[in-house]
Image (cartoon, rainbow, N blue to C red):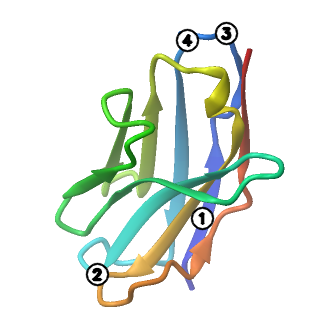
Amino acid sequence: HVQLVESGGGSVQTGGSLRLACEVSGYTPSTHCFAWFRQAPGKEREHVADIDNDGITYYSNSVRGRFTISKDNDENTVYLQMNSLRPEDTATYYCAGRLKWLNEYNYWGQGTQVTVS
């Protein structure tokens, strides 16, 4: 059973940086893909970035060039490095996982709050 636990959220000023971490257990690196989503109050959930089992990455237009997703299979952790943060990046950030042959993410963390002011 795959479990995801996020950490690293907090409050930061505009232009600052944060690194989110998602510790993963119960998975196989060669068969799982991971993503970061975010949701602000009153807004729909947004797919921010993802990384597949081969390390290929995707970014939404809103974060491309500022955020970097990576994974460390030895540490069983997926990271989201967030630079040049803006107030509109304020949201609860969720780590998610799925088997590579499925389209939908079915494993979710509890979320971590990021506030940019």
- Labels 3 and 1: the sequence-earlier one: 1
Q: Label 4, label 2: how many angstroms apart (C-alpha)?
A: 34 Å
Q: Label 3, label 1: how many angstroms apart (C-alpha)?
A: 27 Å
Q: Nearer the viewer, mark 3 or mark 1?
A: 3
Which residue matches tag 3? 13
Query: Contact (CB < 8 A) between labels 2 and 3?
Result: no
> Is 98 situated above or below 44?
below
> Is 101 situated above or below 94?
below
Which residue matches tag 4? 16
- Label 3: few (<14), some or many (≥20) within 10 Å? few
Q: Residue at left 60%, top 64%? A: 4
> Is 103 situated above or below 73?
below
Q: Disc 1 marks which amino acid?
A: Leu
> In the rendering, which numbered label is found on residue 4?
1
> In the rendering, which numbered label is found on residue 31?
2
- Labels 4 and 2: the sequence-earlier one: 4
Expressed as whole percent of the image width and height from the top left, the position of residue 25 reads 52, 69
Query: Contact (CB < 8 A) between labels 1 and 4?
Result: no
